[in-house]
Amino acid sequence: MTTTVTRPGALAASGHPLVRPDAAKHLTDEQVEELGRELDAVRDEILAKRGSADAAYIRRVIKVQRSLEFAGRGTLLFSKYKPAWFAGTAMLSLAKILENMEIGHNVLHGQWDWMRDPDIHSTTWEWDFVTPARSWQHTHNDLHHRWTNVIGKDRDVGYNLLRMDPDQPWKPFNLGNPLYNAILAPVFEWGIALYDLEIPEYKEGLKSKEAMNRDLKAVGVKVVKQFSKDYAATPAVAMLTGSGKQALYGTLAANAIRNFWAHAVIFCGHFPEGTDTFTEEEVEGETRGDWYVRQMIGSANISGSKFMHLMTGNLSHQIEHHCFPDLPSNRYAEVAVRVREICTRYKLPYTTGPLPKQVGSTWAKIFKLALPPRTSKTATA
Amino acid sequence: MIRFMKLARATAALTTPLTAEDFLALFNPVYSSRQLRGIVTRVAHETEDSATIYFRPGHGWHAHQAGQWARIGVELDGVRQWRSYSLSNAAGHDPAITVKDAGSVSHVLVRDTKPGDVLFLAPPQGDFVLPEHPRSLLMLTAGSGITPVMSMIRTLVPRRPDADVVLINSNSTPEKSLFREELDELADQFPNLTVRHWFTSARGRLQFTAQTIADLCPDWRSRAAYACGPEGFLNDAEDLWQQEAAVEQARTVPNVTAGAEAQAATGTLTIERFSTDLTAGAGHDGGLVTFEQSDREVQADGDTPLLDIGEDAGVLMPSGCRMGICHSCLIPLRAGQVRDLRTGELHNTPGQLIQTCVSAAAGPVNLDL
């Protein structure tokens, strides 16, 4: 996609990284190799089962989502009536959450490419989110998923804005950590769009001017379309019933609710207490098994009901998603049982908890890391 | 019209990044912004292992000419699979395909299709079609090779009293003979059609000798011939016509090079193939295949068509006949080398369009897809 990315070759089955992370220090090379084989087997098992039931699942979710979107936006056209405003905003918010997470995120990961359906494919999909799908695929699929939680490589650790790890050097700017995060939440999609432009990379000379211009153009077009749909076209049509202003508030609210929710869920993926970050030495020479270990101890799940999992786009199974980013999301629940068992057997942490606990844990970290480290680094470690 | 376009544009402003079709599909599955679809309207079982599937295509289809084929996509275990099938209906009628249960896709089509099902489609194509000017015709068919010819007969015979069609139709038994009753009825009703059934269970394989063909159709040399059937059947037919052309040439115009003259003297043979032999280029080493735009890399052997390699890697590959004739699957080569599995020929010019359905990797290959 972008020229700065070089594809990693297949990881070696055996061997070891320069340094194995603390949480996996007790494992021998052979054990890690066996762990890799076991997880590969889980993946193969799901691939063998994947079929028409899975295809029917994603089509059903898409149908529900589009029906909600259609009904929600339609109802907002009459939103001068209070119940219509609430119903319309609620349906549109639900639709936007489903579209962004269970559908958009997962389709763009290629989880449904195996169906060979051009209507549901990672190379054709575009989403109801400011950042263009292709830009996001680059920073998310290529960079974040490959370098998960490696400080200095995975910029998702704080998104160039927040200090999310003690190994990130403290600057006075970080005093605003909680404030920045609170501001980011309701406008999350704009933050991601800005982040996907990779402005620091451009400044550091790691991204070419041509690539920058191309990305700016793409995001510009997308901004116009997204903005005019929700904040011009929909209110304009609603003006026919005298509901223009109310419809605008409705779409603003729906986008804010989706942004708020997506932000909360995504921040629970790698930031709660118990997740590890890694140094470049820890990924140097990483084997297949070590790669899995890093994904598992660097990610955190959210426990909850089936509906909760659906509304998080199954990112509540973040650990499983990071081990197998392109398995269909409806399979993560059954994969989770296996992965958890493997973690227990190999005495590896498996971080999970209900949403309020994980959100609280993330915010606690954001507050804590706003302040400079109290003691020297060696003492805290 | 202008108002309609404005309306369409206004709708797009409300549906972006989706389209109006994406929402219309909630009410009628024939709508799609990307993929032509059809709704099955009727399924008629022909023989014990074949069926005719009638469908109503969505926007983007065009009327077929008699003898043409269309790509049909169905889902097997959730995965979309494409095959090409001849349209068996008369031109001007709603499209229908007649399918014999002979593989995974045709099995699903024959056994599981019911009215209301969605078929994925590509518009009709192919040049196995009737001549522009009226001529006397000889049709040679075997097995399901009758399907495109049936479309021609249905189109021509009832409407053109001046037509003159002889059909030699080879099948193993009368029971397995597609459209046998309809053909007999048409032949009874219309003097411009003569049907010669050949049942191999009783008479053995149809031998393509001048004598056998003359017994079935004495004036065969003066007719424009069309043949459709299995590989061996078509090869035999081609051999006979080539021999005759050579004889004609030797006898009448000894000093003129072969070609148009000779063909005019015997009569042309137009053939439609349903399969291709891909073994000529097989048995070599493959290489790493990179689909540049899709950002996928796959290690490929030297025998598997790049089309299959890409599909298995989740790349959205354009495809068509899967036998190297329709050119629906062309992808530009960016770098590297491929081998044509039919001939063994190597292609390595950057920018060259590669037929992925009959080409395999011969070393590393980068494709612009």
Image: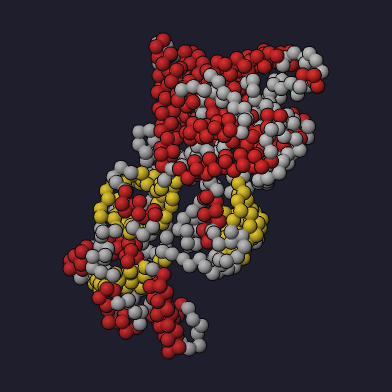
The answer to whether residue A380 is left or right of residue A148 is right
**x then y, percent, for residue B194:** 24, 72
The answer to whether residue A169 is left or right of residue A267 is right
Q: Residue at x 77, y 30 (%)?
A: A203
The quadrant holding residue A22 is top right
Q: Residue at x 78, y 13 (%)?
A: A374
B68 vs A184: above or below: below
**x then y, percent, for residue B191:** 20, 70
Q: Residue at x 52, y 23 (%)?
A: A303
**x then y, percent, for residue B71:** 41, 53
B339 vs B118: above or below: below
Image quarter of the N terminus of chain B: top left
Front-most of residues B242 and A184? A184
B155 vs A299: above or below: below
Front-most of residues B250 and A127? A127
Q: Residue at x 75, y 35 (%)?
A: A19
**x then y, percent, for residue B18:** 48, 33
Q: Is residue B144 visible?
A: yes
